[in-house]
Amino acid sequence: MKDYRKILEENNQGSLLRFIDKLDESKKENLIKQVEEIDFEQVNKLYETSNIEIDKAIKGVIIEHVPFVDKYKMEESKYNHLEELGSNVIKEGKYAVVTMAGGQGTRLGHKGPKGSFLLNVKPKEKYLFQIIAENLEKENEKHEIVLPWYIMTSTENNKKTVEFFEEHNFFGYPKENVYFFNQGNLPLLSEEGKLLIDENYNIKLASDGNGSIYKSMKKEGILDDMKKRGIEWIFIGAVDNALLNMCDPILLGLTIDEGNEIGSKSVVKANPHERVGVFCKKDSRPAVIEYTELPESMAEETDEDGELLFGESHIMCNLYSLKAIEKIAGQNLPYHSAYKKASYIDENGNLVEATEPNSYKYEAFIFDGFNYFDNISILRGRREEDFAPIKNKEGVDSPETAIKLYNDYWKL
Ligand code: UTP
C-alpha cells in the first residue's frame, strides 16, 4: 500500500490530510482509497495551467481560413455521387452513431441528464433523447438497417440515464442496439490547487469534458465492439441539438471522396460576433477556435465574395473513421480550465456553499482531436436544417428557439 500521508504532503495537500485525520474509520478508508487513485502528477500540471490567459494560449500560433464545401452549392452530379457513396456505407452496416450525453447542462439548469429534458414541440412534447431515437429510427427505415447507438454518460448521470431509457422503453429503439458507456473524471481544484471534498466525504470529481470521448471509447471497449461489427465510420454528436442530422450521406460521401479520416458539418455564423467556435487551421492543422480567442478583426474578415473567412461554426456534428478515433485515443488532448462555483466541505466538516466561482474544472474539448490530422472535410449545412441547440434557460439557444426551429423544420 502506498503511504497516503506522504503522497498528500508531497503534493501540497496537507489540509486534506488534516481533514482525513479527523474522520471515522470507514470515511477515512474510503477517502484514502480515492487519494491513492489520483494521478497527482497530472493534477499538479493541470493546476499550473489554470490561469493561462487566452491571448497567451494562441500567441505565436498561425491561424488561417480552412476551406469548406456548401451542401447546396455543388453541382447536382457531385451531390448525387456523394449521396450514393455515403448511403452505400450506411446500408452496408458500416456506420454507427454516438451521442455525447455526459455534460452537466449547468446553463440550462435542468435536474437530471440533459437528454431527459422535455421540449414542448408540436404536436406533442418530446424528450431530447426521444427526438434522437425517433430520428435514428427514420434512418433505420430508410436504409433498412439498425444503427448501433452508443451513448456516452458521466459517472454522475449514468444510472439516471439508463433508468430513464428503461422507463420509456427505449422510445421504441431496439434495445439490444443501444449501449451506454462512461466518460472519465477529473478532480476539481480550489484556487489554491487543493482537492475539494463533497457532502458525502468523497473527493469532488467532475466529468473531464467531451474530448474525453476518444479515450473513453477505447477504454470502455466501444472501439472493440465496433470493430467486431465491421463499423468503419462513426458519427459523434451532441445530445442538445434538436435538429442534429446524424446520418447525412453527403457529409460521409464528401469525407470519403476527399480522402479524409474526419469530417464535420458546419453552419455559417449568424453574425461575426456570435458566441460559437469556428473552424480554422492552427499551424496548418484543422482546428476550432473559440469565440473568446478569435481577435475581433479576424472575426469580421471576409473574402472577395463577402463570406466570413472564419464563419463556419462547429456544431458538434462530427464524423470519423474508426482508425481516426483510435489514433486520437492514443493522444493526450490538452485540458482547458474553467473557473466555476463548487460547494464543498471545509477542514472542520462544514458545508461551504459557493455564491461566486471558487474552483477550477478541467475539460478536454472534442474538437482538439482534429489537430492530429492534416485535413478535415467540412460540409456547410443550413442552420434551419441542422442546428437547434438547447444551451440556455432562455434567450439565445434556449428551449424556446429550439422549439421554433424544430416545428418549422418538421412543418408542425
Ligand atoms: P456543452 O459543452 O455545451 O456542455 O456540451 P453542457 O454540459 O451541455 O452544458 P453546460 O456548459 O454545463 O451549460 C456539449 C455536448 O457535449 C456533451 C454534452 O452532454 C453535450 O452533448 N458533454 C459535455 C459530455 O458528454 N461530457 C462533458 O464532460 C461535457
Image (cartoon, grey):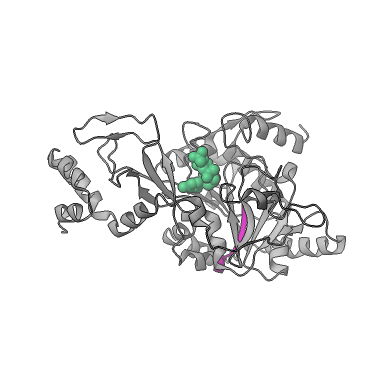
- The span picked out in magenta is 317-324
From the viewer's perspective, tell me whether residue 110 is left or right of residue 283. Answer: left
Relative image position of residue 85 (x, y in whole percent) = 74, 65
Closer to the camera in the image, 139 or 77: 77
Whole-percent x, y for residue 140 in the image: 67, 51
Main secondary structure of the magenta stretch: strand
The residue depicted at 23 percent of the width and 54 percent of the height is 11
Number of marks: 0
Looking at the picture, how far across and down is residue 97, in whole percent? 59, 54
| Quarter-of-image position of residue 397 | top right
Q: Residue at x 13, y 42 (%)?
A: 21
Residue at the extreme right of the image, as rendered: 76
Q: Quadrant of residue 263?
A: bottom right
Q: Is residue 393 visible?
A: yes
Q: Is residue 146 visible?
A: no
* 134 relative to 10, above or below: above
Task: Give the position of the N terminus as an image quadrant.
Answer: bottom left
